Amino acid sequence: MKKIKLLFWYVSVCLLPTLCPQAFAQSYPSKPIKILVGFSPGGVPDIAARVISQKLTEKWGQSVIVENKLGAGSNIAAQALSTSSPDGYTLLSISSAHTIAPSIYSKLAFDPQKDFSGVTLTSTGPAFVIVSPQIGVNTMGEFLALARAKPGQLNFASAGTGSGSHFAIELLKSQTHIDLVHIPFKGIPEALTETMAGRTHIFISPYATAVQLVKEGKAKAIAVTSLSRVADFPDLPTVSEAGVPGYKWIFWYAILAPAKTPKPILDKLNQEIANILKLTDVKNKFQPLGIDPISNSPEEMDRLIVEEIANFKKLASAAQIKPE
């Protein structure tokens, strides 16, 4: 009787993923998986999640659904993940903005370093430097000369205080010692529209948002923020080439799981998503967005988050960025 009870106890315990992770990983997934997205449909985090979810569904024969959970610059979705069971059935598709929040908010409902486990990067992409057509500049050098001639008289648009587009300009300011006035908007579309209309003077826009407008000549791009030129715009110089040596701003996108998710589960997800990102049809879906599919290990993802948070904290402190 004691042996039966002991066997029953052992089997019950081994059903817990934290105590018997290898066995749990072998049967994973045995129910639908949910990928949370803290942004509106159509953005890169959303598109990446949907491409990956479709391929995982096909591979595993188990539903992988995407849920857009908007609010607070994706912090609501991150909070939801932080309180989810660490079993691999709830994931989060993020942008690099995830690592900015700790630099400007002293209190968050989650700890960006302790409450999550990295699964993998999904993609990276550059941004366009968009300028107002009314200020009469055609190059990065001309803009910098104008800004130095008129300190504090030019402004820059952003998708909100603490957004990636905000920090991208703050990095530019710190490396060039120019003085620009910050004009925050509710999101990227508004900031881009205001700059195109001439009501703001400069905006660093994610490639995917502005690419068609730049091709049509509706948005005036004077540089890209990567260290290498973009294939679709070979004549458009990088910011580094155009007068700010070493300047680089890359938006990156990734998948996270709750902290304490068993390592075998993380590894299984990592391997499958890495394989998906190598597929030709996936690359073809990402290419029009100006993003490159790329993966890394869970450990590398964790290190990237730690490094990015430290970098953004330094930049926020130097620029005295505070939430409004």
Image (cartoon, helix red, strand yellow):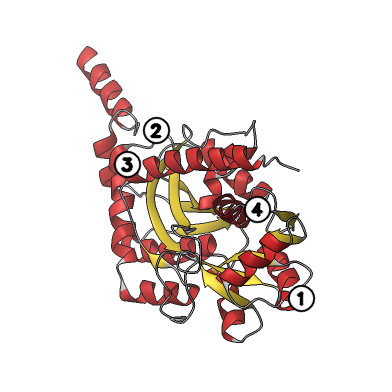
Residue situated in front as seen by the camera: 172 or 91: 172
Which amino acid is tagged 3? Glu
Q: Residues within 10 Å of mark 4 (few under 14, many from 20)?
A: some
Residue situated in front as seen by the camera: 169 or 123: 169
Which amino acid is tagged 1? Ala
Residue that badge 4 annotates: 70
Q: CA distance from mark 3 to mark 2?
A: 13 Å
Say whether disc 3 or disc 1 marks the residue closer to the N-terminus.
1
Q: Residues within 10 Å of mark 2 (few under 14, many from 20)?
A: some
| Disc 3 to disc 4: CB gap under 8 Å | no
Residue that badge 1 annotates: 197
Circle 4 SS class: loop
Residue that badge 3 annotates: 299
Residue 260: give its label: 2
Residue situated in front as seen by the camera: 205 or 131: 131
Q: CA distance from mark 2 to mark 1?
A: 48 Å
Q: Which mark is nearer the camera, 4 or 1?
A: 1
